[in-house]
Amino acid sequence: MAQRFDPVFARIESGTVARERSRELAHDAVQSLKASGFTALRVPQAYGGAGLSFAQFFPLLSRLAAADSNLPQILRAHFSFIEQRLESNDETARKRWFERIARGEVIGAATSERSGVTHNSVTLLPDPVSGKLQLNGEKYYSTGTLYADWISVAAHDDQSDLNVVIPAQVPGVARLDDWDGFGQRLTASGTTRFDAVAVDESWIVTRYDASQPRRNSLITAFLQTVHLATLAGIGQAVLRDSITFVQGRTRTFGVPGQSSPRENPLVQRTVGRIASLAYSTQGIVERLARRLDELQRKRAESTATTDDYIAADVETFQAQQIVIEQTLEAATLLFETGGASATSETLRFDRHWRNARTLASHNPAAQREAAIGDYYLNGNAPEERFSQAHASQGRGARVSA
């Protein structure tokens, strides 16, 4: 399986620096992943996908991240959508969406908002005149939507929060490339607006309560592991670039005349440290992947408990603390291999640190570390809530997972 995607990764990697310099969105790279079947790796074979386990999937995701770390982030919501369908008991929806994904269709996300409170403000309500459902509102951090065929939107109506999946090109949808983060610049994680978007009832996929913590689901652990696999891939890219950079040099700082940096013990030690950090982060991700496979097996056998899901979340939070630190250290050490010449804009080595730091900022590590401590000291499960309760939910509205 790895050999199947090596040529795809190589083509993506060959254009990474040029895309970074010109801020060219990675449409061709995404298209090549769709055409190769990469976007259907976790779709079961019965629906036309590859049916890979987590232990098979995450190393491939890291290899993609080593080629260009924007790509796993672009597809994070897409792969999460697949996992949500795998957890669902709705076979009709599973078949409909898996067959589309197997054909190469991609789902983006419009979930998070920039506002003063944690709230889900996008509405799906009947038009007062026509009575037809309309989607209205605005989302930010809409990662991947500019590359997507469909957009998974978090909204609410007079009953509950809901997940509605709409065609990306439907009238009334505006997708803006206004993401201004200093890293992961090509993920198109900007604004998506919905202005009286006509919605078919069949596009509503699930109902839920965003004011309640997520329980008995692998999704939190899965989403975090995608970030960690991407960081591990950045570590592999740092190692690759440090080796190539040092091998091509003929002068060492502070040594008169021509010299061979690759023979310098201090340079060797730096590259050795980078290699060790990359080894560690990849090993942690592979361990998490095995844990998720085991939990998914128990889920299929109906033997998974709430404590099992909580333990998986805590383990990914623990891994987050280490993988972030080690990847950022490796990305910094790269500049110790060659002095000021390593800062050349031509090389764009700074993208590794910027991308890693941006990924690390998506889920505050300090908050997660406190949750870990509370879990071990007091037995309290991590609790993250993504919306205030809506008034209708306070009146006992019907909500299904």
Image (spheres, rainbow, N blue to C red):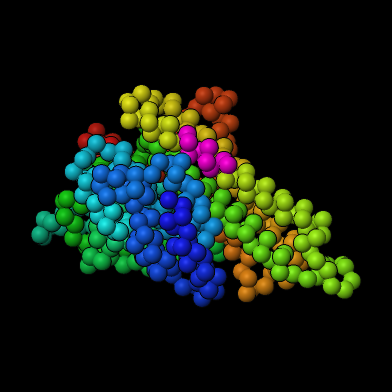
Residue 132: percent from the left, percent from the top? 13, 56
Q: Residue at x 29, y 59 (%)?
A: 105
Quadrant for the C terminus in the image: top left
Which portion, as a residue range, is magenta? 283-291
Residue 226: percent from the left, percent from the top? 47, 48
Q: Residue at x 55, y 24 (%)?
A: 378
Q: Of helix, strand and loop, which mostly describes the magenta segment?
A: helix
Residue 211: percent from the left, percent from the top? 36, 39
Q: Is residue 384 above or below residue 153?
A: above
User: On the image, which quarter does residue 239 sit in?
Assistant: bottom right
Judged left or right of residue 283, residue 337 is right
Task: Pick the residue in front: 134 or 225.
Answer: 225
User: On the image, which quarter does residue 241 sit in?
Assistant: bottom right
Q: Residue at x 16, y 51 (%)?
A: 201
Q: Is residue 86 above or below residue 142?
A: above
Quick check: can you spot residue 111? no
